[in-house]
């Protein structure tokens, strides 16, 4: 961080990103987000990992033309639970 203070949220996002780059463990790291993924800076993982959806992407997301668009996939590696903290905890 170059001596600058960082929020715990930003540190956590960087930690998750670093873990996802480690070949030995990356397949075992599954970010579970109850909501606010964009607020916390996790939107870059939407395209990179894909959001797990049992039937894949069944609609065209509004942000499809953006670099960090919302991408659901059958092989998605991120759980986006929406406004549902209890669901996120039970997914864990």
Image (cartoon, rainbow, N blue to C red):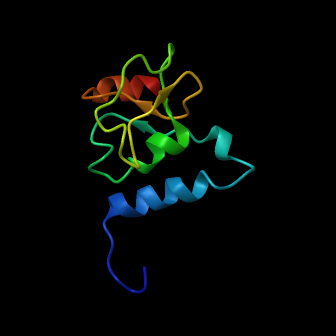
Quarter where residue 33 is shown: top left
10 lies above or below 54: below
As displayed, is residue 17 above or below residue 66? below
Q: Residue 49 at what x, y percent from top left?
A: 54, 40
In the foreground, 86 or 30: 30
Q: Position of residue 36 (x, y in %)?
A: 27, 42
Image vertical order of residue 41 relative to residue 60, above or below: below
Tell me what residue is drawn at x 38 percent, y 47 percent: 43
Q: Residue furthest right?
A: 24
Q: Position of residue 70 (x, y in %)?
A: 38, 36
- Kindly give the residue lying farthest to the bottom in the view shown: 3
Quarter-wise, where is residue 74 in the image?
A: top right
> Which residue is at a point 31% across and 52% down the rendered structure image?
40
Q: Is residue 78 left or right of residue 20?
A: left
Number of numbered tags placed on the structure image: 0
In this view, the residue in front, 88 or 42, is: 42
* Point 54% across, 30% down: residue: 76
Residue 64 % position (x, y): 37, 37
Q: Quadrant of the N terminus?
A: bottom left
Say left or right for 25 vs 56: right
**Which image quarter: residue 57?**
top left
Please tell me which residue is depicted at 60% across the width and 54% down the height of the picture.
19
Of 33 and 38, nearer the camera is 38
User: Residue lying farthest front?
Assistant: 65
């Amino acid at each position: 961080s170059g001596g600058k203070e960082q929020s715990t949220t930003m540190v956590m996002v960087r930690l998750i990103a670093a873990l996802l780059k480690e070949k030995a463990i990356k397949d075992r790291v599954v970010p579970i987000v109850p909501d606010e993924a964009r607020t916390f800076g996790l939107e870059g993982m939407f395209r990179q990992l894909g959001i797990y959806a049992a039937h894949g992407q069944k609609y065209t997301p509004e942000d499809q033309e953006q670099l960090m668009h919302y991408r659901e996939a059958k092989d998605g590696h991120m759980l986006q639970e929406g406004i549902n903290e209890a669901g996120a905890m039970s997914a864990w």
